[in-house]
Amino acid sequence: MNKKIVNKNGLNMKVMWVFCASLVLLVVSNAVSAAGDATSGQQKSTVCVGCHGVNGEGVEANTKIAGLSVGKFSAAMQAYKSGERNHAMMQMFAKKLNDQDIQDLAAYYATK
């Protein structure tokens, strides 16, 4: 005999477990896809080199970005992108970047 286990609300427990497992996988996969790829970030960093140096070390008065945490780098770029931080050149570059570009660049510079 195949008896289904049902909770007090009448829901099949097997269905609930599958639903919960699927939800967890969805959340984890979104978190993983949101993480940056340092290799892609290195390829995208060519535009940064002129002002921030080959390794993000900063050139003259331009900010050192090498070694910034992913969170600090991402927050700064989002602030330039939204106009919250005022710097015409950085705003112009940041507005061209999508969220994945920013995460990739952040991952790259965090490794420097």
Image: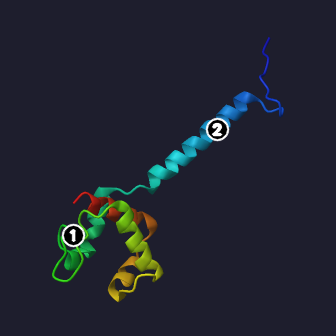
**Residue 18: horizontal and vertical position, in percent?**
65, 34
- Quarter occupied by residue 4: top right
Element carrying mark 1: loop
Residue 107 appearing in the image? yes
Q: What mark, if any, has residue 31 been given in the picture? A: none
Q: Residue at x 21, y 74 (%)?
A: 49
* Residue occupying image coordinates x 24% and y 77%: 63
Looking at this view, name the residue that lies furthest to the bottom: 88
Q: What kind of residue is marked 1? A: Gly
Does 98 sit left or right of 57 as displayed?
Answer: right
Q: Amino acid at mark 2?
A: Cys
Q: Which mark, residue 56?
A: 1
Q: Neighbour class for label 2 at 10 Å: few (<14), some, many (≥20)?
A: few
Q: Is residue 95 visible?
A: no
Between 25 and 10, the one lying in front of the other is: 10
Q: Which residue is mark 2?
A: 20
Residue at 26% in and 74% down: 48
Is 64 located above or below residue 41 in the figure? below
* Residue at the spot 83% in from the left edge and 30% down from the top edge: 8
> Is residue 21 toward the left or the right of residue 6 in the image?
left
Where's the C terminus, which quadrant? bottom left
